[in-house]
Amino acid sequence: MDQDKKQAHIETLESQPARLIDLVNYQDCSVVSREIINKKTGTVTVFAFDEGQGLSEHTAPFDALVYLLEGEAEIVISGRPLRLEEGEIVIMLANQPHALKAIKNFLQQVQQASRQECLQCRLLSCQHYQKNCKTIVFLPKYNRLFLSKQQYN
């Protein structure tokens, strides 16, 4: 799809309610994806994995938050297998090898953020976050996920 068509496709979702599980459909023996946001600072993509399908081991230059919308999956991060079920999340750090496989049909949302932009907000004193960032942030100091800066200010 050329860039103009991609942008028009994304703009149809702007300022409108949408259910993530309705944005992509399963296809037999396939992995289907739909990019929701594509910016220099990161992406948001929804994937549908048919049972038994997966992605072989690869790396990504961004940190990623993976949210399993429905189903069940095995995700291997740096050789460590994790089993995720509906409603669970996992954070994959940039450049860590990872692979995914559908135990049952599953839908996932992946939010990738450039470490230089949003995920620099892991520091409590980060000026960027205090002024601009409205993303989900994992703070190792507290070993938990924060949805807004108000939760830890």
Image (cartoon, rainbow, N blue to C red):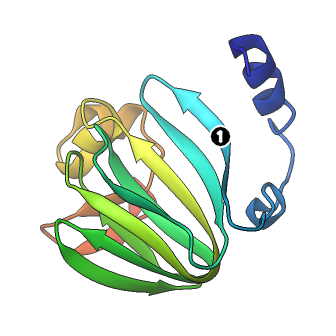
Point 22% across, 51% down: residue: 122
**On screen, 18 above or below 85?**
above
Residue 11 sits in quarter: top right
Q: In terms of depth relative to the viewer, which is nearer, 110 or 33?
A: 33
Q: Which residue is mark 1?
A: 35
**On screen, 1 above or below 70?**
above
Coordinates of residue 147 in the picture (x, y in percent): 45, 62
Coordinates of residue 24 in the picture (x, y in percent): 78, 56
Point 60% across, 48% down: residue: 45
Question: Is residue 49 visible in this depiction of the protein?
Answer: yes
Residue 22 sits in quarter: bottom right
Question: Is residue 152 visible in this depiction of the protein?
Answer: no
**On screen, 149 above or below 66?**
above
Q: Amino acid at mark 1?
A: Glu
Local crowd at mark 1 within 10 Å, few (<14), some, or many (≥20)?
some
Which quadrant does the N terminus fall into?
top right
Q: In terms of depth relative to the viewer, which is nearer, 142 or 80?
A: 80
Coordinates of residue 43 in the picture (x, y in percent): 51, 38
Q: In terms of depth relative to the viewer, which is nearer, 31 or 39?
A: 31
Q: Is residue 108 left or right of residue 92?
A: right
Dot 1: element: strand
